[in-house]
Image (tube, coloured by chain):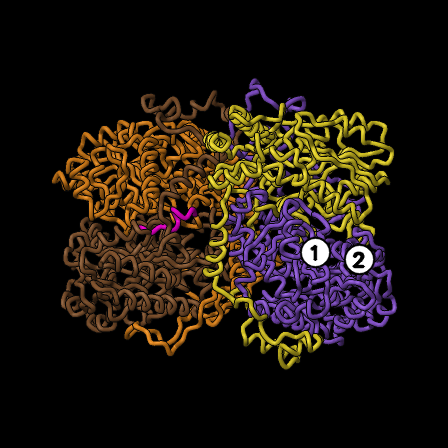
Chain colours: A purple, B orange, C brown, D yellow
Amino acid sequence: LEEALIFEIGSNDTTGVDLPPVDRKRSTRLGAFARAEKPELPGLSEPQTVRHYTRLSRQNYAIDLGLFPLGSCTMKHNPRLNEKVARMPGFADVHPLQPVSTVPGALEVINELSMWLIKLTGMHAVAMSPKAGAHGELCGMLCIRAALEARGDAREVVLVPESAHGTNPATAAFAGYRVENIPATEDGRVDLEAMKARLGPDVAAVMITNPNTCGLFERDMKAISDAVHAAGGFVYCDGANFNAIVGRVRPGDLGVDAMHINLHKTFSTPHGGGGPGSGPVVLSEALGPFMPLPYASRTKDGVVHLVEEESADAFSQEHFGGIMQSFGRMTAFHGQMGMFTRALTYMLSHGADGLRQVAEDAVLNANYVLRSMEDLLHAPYAASGPCMHEALFGDRDFAKGFSTLDLAKALIDEGYHPMTVYFPLVVHGAMLVEPTETESKAALDQFIAAFRNVASRANAGEEAMKSAPYYAPRRRLDETQAARNPVLAYTGEVAPAGKPTMSERGGR
Amino acid sequence: LEEALIFEIGSNDTTGVDLPPVDRKRSTRLGAFARAEKPELPGLSEPQTVRHYTRLSRQNYAIDLGLFPLGSCTMKHNPRLNEKVARMPGFADVHPLQPVSTVPGALEVINELSMWLIKLTGMHAVAMSPKAGAHGELCGMLCIRAALEARGDAREVVLVPESAHGTNPATAAFAGYRVENIPATEDGRVDLEAMKARLGPDVAAVMITNPNTCGLFERDMKAISDAVHAAGGFVYCDGANFNAIVGRVRPGDLGVDAMHINLHKTFSTPHGGGGPGSGPVVLSEALGPFMPLPYASRTKDGVVHLVEEESADAFSQEHFGGIMQSFGRMTAFHGQMGMFTRALTYMLSHGADGLRQVAEDAVLNANYVLRSMEDLLHAPYAASGPCMHEALFGDRDFAKGFSTLDLAKALIDEGYHPMTVYFPLVVHGAMLVEPTETESKAALDQFIAAFRNVASRANAGEEAMKSAPYYAPRRRLDETQAARNPVLAYTGEVAPAGKPTMSERGGR
Amino acid sequence: MRYLPLTDTDRAAMLETIGAPDINALFSDVPQEARLDGPIHDLPMHASEMAVERHMRTLSKKNLAAADAPFFLGAGAYRHHVPASVDHIIQRGEFLTAYTPYQPEIAQGTLQMLFEFQSQVARLYGCAVANASMYDGSTACWEAITMAGRVTKKARAVLSCGLHPHYVEVARTMAKFTGDAIVSAAPDLDAGCAEDALIAEIDDETSCVVVQYPDILGRIPDIRKIAAALEGSKALLIVVNTEPVALGALEAPGNLGADIVVGEGQAIGVGLQFGGPYLGLFAVTNQKLVRQMPGRLCGETVDADGKRGFVLTLSTREQHIRREKATSNICTNSGLCALAFSVHMTLLGGEGLERLAMENHRLACIAADRLVEISGVSVLNDVFFNEFTVVLDRDAREVVRVLAEKGVLAGVSLGRLFPAEDALANGLLVAVTETTSEEDIETMATALEEILA
Amino acid sequence: MRYLPLTDTDRAAMLETIGAPDINALFSDVPQEARLDGPIHDLPMHASEMAVERHMRTLSKKNLAAADAPFFLGAGAYRHHVPASVDHIIQRGEFLTAYTPYQPEIAQGTLQMLFEFQSQVARLYGCAVANASMYDGSTACWEAITMAGRVTKKARAVLSCGLHPHYVEVARTMAKFTGDAIVSAAPDLDAGCAEDALIAEIDDETSCVVVQYPDILGRIPDIRKIAAALEGSKALLIVVNTEPVALGALEAPGNLGADIVVGEGQAIGVGLQFGGPYLGLFAVTNQKLVRQMPGRLCGETVDADGKRGFVLTLSTREQHIRREKATSNICTNSGLCALAFSVHMTLLGGEGLERLAMENHRLACIAADRLVEISGVSVLNDVFFNEFTVVLDRDAREVVRVLAEKGVLAGVSLGRLFPAEDALANGLLVAVTETTSEEDIETMATALEEILA
């Protein structure tokens, strides 16, 4: 059965909550803008609500249903303990502006998590308030800019590899920088010599992803950092792929100045269909003093302090010898507490030994996929050394007229969410597969069999693939129409009937 | 994708919990039966476990997915608040044998719920320990037997209508009685005169379901009770259908001596795929003193006492003038506390006014279905007056060779769970439809359309119906093979491949 | 009212379709004198979710939750750590709000789970077949006794003195009505399990011998010896287990000669819940006995396409088919608790169950060693799993009460379990699980020292 | 390690397939000097679920949860009762563990929800189009300012003195880097909203005027008047709302002349959570502005069979397509919070939202009337929704601190929000919602009386 919109099944008079009816005769102190009529919003009773969303949910794919091989996204198992902990009243039911004396446990969580992040990355400080990876990138770039401005050094260019995530150039631009590309070598890594040649007094920073989006470790990372530092710039590292190296390599040891960490990738807070995330930024000694407010910090006596506008000056005066020059505030309140509790719970569960095993198993699983597919599918960097936690393939060997999109949609009919496609841009028809460490060998073998099946069919040019998927809740959707004539809110039009889908005829 | 058995995907060496490995050299005090080897039980890691059960769950139909019109079962919405309350630590994490002084709140729950049940039914006392409806029936019948024995009156027959639930005769037999049937009138009710004729000094009790399983209110209930009482017997009422009358009629006003209440029907504790239920038994003044231990009771001073073996004699001596003659204990501990908290939460949410509305809407919904179908489907008692909360149909008008089973299975392909079929036995090819009060008119209209569709096809004799369902996770299952050659535990045999199902080809 | 979707407009339209002038017309069959003309007096009206939640939270907070005290209670209900994923899974609407799987085509989720559950229980117990659950251990025990009666056509059940007194009570209560004879005695405060006395009670009329393993005092009876004594007799050996975690450390009863193994499954996955809902387990070593078993059974079969599938089977034993000739009147059982058990057991696996059991035993040994140091305390048991009996120099009921005032939930006094047995009054049952910390043990020992000093 | 399914046997087999001698071979590209040869020093090793849960519970219990005290904090984060079914739904694995819906064929659940969410937000705000969420209100506010800059090609933003100081701070911080000019002032302790002063700041270079409604002191500014003043100007009117429940009682900003309406959605469905994750709402009254909007948009379309379906659309505005030319760098947003908001809003409906709002207002009036009775207390606001400012006869920071010691969470002192503004130091923001009982109000009033006496 199709699931109607709440606007089609709800009414403005129905409500699923029990509250006293409004007495329109009662006097109010609402002033001139008091509503004459209630808002036009559809309501449903509780049974209808639960059923509507339960049925909707079943049109989704999710990690809980199967492997989710999205390269660069690290879709791993989300432990249920984390959800339970995040809902403890001392975390879920405290206000960000409560007197500090009433929230010592919350501050300890922030502090304990900060300690883990600093030790795992080998960095010096961490800004906890950024709301997601891209927000963290922005935070890091603003720290760099603040540090440069503090030394009176106006620079205007940021170098970004072509294979970078789109957020990197967007962030640099939002921080007021001009973006230039860094070329890559044949083997899929940053061209060190070309980069060195570009460095100069106008280059504020280099943004590197390591392991990079081709799935490779940047062997020359230390040399890159040294060169950038020598030229007076800073090194920003995109931490999206930290899952591959956590516990085995510390970015701080490679000369990184700033790196955001996606708690919702490496540390398993759930993606929730597009957020919320959390993007703390670890910083080198040079950048630490420029962290945004508010932050939490432990002083030498072991006490945790929450530092806000109110206390920032006095605090840094007392504890950091007055050198704190925070660039300001990036968001109201203290950041994604709900994600902090989950991430800390995950770290404590795994421990230092477990996190190291995470990286090893993630890399092992990715290489297993790479080597199980490379005879059938073009793997452009298969010869560039082991891949890290994701395996990259291209569409070179497909029959004419067949695209990566066709393969991806055919994979849906095999029961899987497709891999990341058409990213990174440097590989034609890119397919980036990241199995993560939470998949069993049996699950991988089953996935590889399906993947080989669709790859063979793409190579052979099986016509039916072009119309896949056949068995999903929807066939391919018309994205052009959606963009050309955007319908972005319910207008009252009745849904077209269309042909009944398989799943519709299937009843459930 | 098919979901394998845990025995096929798990291993005896894998575990999803972190506990210290066993040190086989450590000395133990386990004695002669200490295990030499660990048990042979398959383990899965947490990600595999969550995925296995999540995927399994999706092969189920449930109220959360759609209307569940099972007559006599009262499949209504299960509020989420109830689940939350049942998990509060003061209810979920207390031991039944904790000192009474440490569990006053738990006792208050039992007492408060008892008070509601007594007032809603107009009865005198309530035994809270029975574990489910059938256990409650047994409790009621044992009270009756204990009361009769206490007056030295050995009786041996229990009268049960043909249309009764199977548990009724089974219970009477378990309580040591011989079961005889009561005939019904043309219009689907107990034949009062025939029953009166059978009453006598050998009849211990009459078991009546009211509203009865034909969906009708027993108009003569009071007369039945009077006749039974006059003959020295007791009236047991099966409370499975209490949902139809809660807040509108009190069984105590109709002369009932004992009635179990299915908390998982009328008071919305979830069915959970077959339990746990809870079956408190309300009792008349005559039967109250025979309640099983343990019970909770409030004394005149308002204090709640938990009465167990330890204190029963002293308690009844002090507070009931020594008349308590409990027939004993039916189960370890105090009954289904987890269901009590849910049911009480539900009652408090609805209140006296809401529960009355429950009955009204349940009856309204059932009559709406009855009157919307009777032109198409044989409704044997359509002329016997309004139905209560369920509508009964028969297969009289079907084309030759088509059965109620065929219609039920075809309804699956329409996206619904079938109604109760072949019950009550008094109607040929019975179909008992109970929509409950938690269905909206829109949901009913959609269901009625589907129901009319399959009824028309059964009347017309559409051949394809005989092989329905087509679109469920499984086609019709071979129950004969299952019973003839029972395979009741995993034996290591590999599953047959069979033809791929629709849903299998559908991927998810 | 938030759970009722009909609007007044809907109600009016539906009454019109029905052809009834008002809702009262639909209740016209109710005799005038029994009709209530308004909400029942003296009960509160509907309340918001917030108000109800607050009320229930207030009641909950009046109780001392086990997590908030050093906790040593067992006696048939055990506190173990249940992984969060177990509760997550049982709250999936598709499991929580489904009915008994009578329509197998759209209930394979519940059915496959039950098949897996039955298989897990059978292996845990060392049996051939287990059913799909009973209400709890005590009713499962009684059902086993009646089943033995059906199988042997005899009616004298011999109960070991180590059987949980509530289980004995249930059997005695039910036997009053069925006419079975129940032979039982209270235990002595002795380290031995009195197997010989039990064996001496077996005669030609005996339908079964019922032995608890480990027993109510935490002792581990010699099942093999009793089984040997039953050789050649028709009577069945019923072994009762109230702590399934013990079977990670002790041999399965089915491998020691039991015919029927029953027990309480609560310890795995279910939680304390003040006594219910719990989970009755029921298994037999010989598949031939299956047609005399009570309760639901799930079996493997194939569908019309030849695919493996599962159905409820052998229902000709059950009440809804066989009515007064059924093997039991049980209908609704403990389906969701069975799911919780099965999920937890899957997370454990054989490896995890053994580790869990040995961690329980390790901590129990520490507790026994610490308590025996206290003057006025002796430990009864030579061998035990995670629960043992200490004997105090005074009535344990009073000691438990005083310790509760000090915030220590010290165990179950034998006086509470056996109110009529003065000889047991000084006994205290102490259970120790992985949730007990060494600090908890020390807190209790110190408090006990103070009281006994 | 309970989250890692590979066994050592699996690992060995896989290394063989790969052709690597050991796991270290797969890390051979890491420079020797950066390789760690064991677990990182100084961090704990793995721990059982029980141990971790205990540790986190200990930390949780150190905090005073709002439910355990009379509670009056607001200032941009509001405590409302969230129905249990909301949390149940957001914990469905299919919502919780899904990714951004880039593969629409198998993400219709999330997509339809987002379409419904966008439609709900648009209606609530009186707008044409809303996006699929931002991080929170403060970042949404800044994104609105930059959007106004893109639309008007001007760079001077005029902020009302009633805008939340954190939101002002965020704008100031970001403007430092983008070079925008931010005009803002602290509020006076005055019942009026200083609309005239704001209007006076508007000039030809102004890209936008930003007004909070209700404002940080709980006052309700005259949006219509400001909109009228902007007639003929290119500058956009941005209205910020931090308490969506207010819009059940107050006219929607879109109907009062706003061009962009942004706000914090936390109050509906999300919970306090010590400040995050929250839910940024973003909507425009004129659909033509949509191509300059930041963030994701979900749109309706049809599939190859002609059935209605939903997709993420207009992504040419976004970073993953447009990179450095994107309208924002936002990627991950607040999807699951949007779901919680949408479910809660569906349970409310227009009827429930209005009832909820009026219940908030009723209780807030009671609180204001009670507090004003206290000597040394005056109430600033003539009009307000559920939050108002009281002026004490001394620094409110200290009063808040002392009340916290007495177990009363009395509100947010203006000194905490505006540390640099001594003139505001005696101000205390008091928020009252349906979760506040009249008893709570009395408890706080009594405690305040004691302190001020």
Task: Classify residue B166 by image quadrant.
Answer: top left
Residue in the image at 35% along x and 48% along y: C64
Tell me where the magenta segment starts and ends, as one range.
Answer: B87-96
Which is the main secondary structure of the residues drawn in magenta? loop
Report if residue B62 lies within the magenta region: no
Report if residue B95 lies within the magenta region: yes
Query: How far, Cα to Cα, is label 2 from label 1?
Result: 13 Å
* Residue marked by disc 1: A323
Q: Is residue A117 above or below residue B78?
A: below
Q: Is residue A384 above or below residue C11?
A: below
| Position of residue A60 measured from the top left corner of the image (x, y, whole percent) | 62, 51
Kindly identify which chain the residue marked by label 2 belongs to. Answer: A
Q: Are both tags, 2 and 1, on one chain?
A: yes
- Whether residue B447 is visible, yes or no, is no
- Classed neighbour count for the residue bearing mark 1: other residues with Cα under 10 Å, few (<14), some (14–19), many (≥20): some
Q: Is residue C294 above or below residue B384?
A: below
Which one is earlier in the sequence, the residue at label 2 or at label 1?
2
Which quadrant of the figure contains the C terminus of chain B?
bottom right
Q: What type is the residue that disc 2 sits on?
A: Arg
- Name the foreground residue: C303 vs C402: C402
Q: What type is the residue that disc 1 sits on?
A: Ile
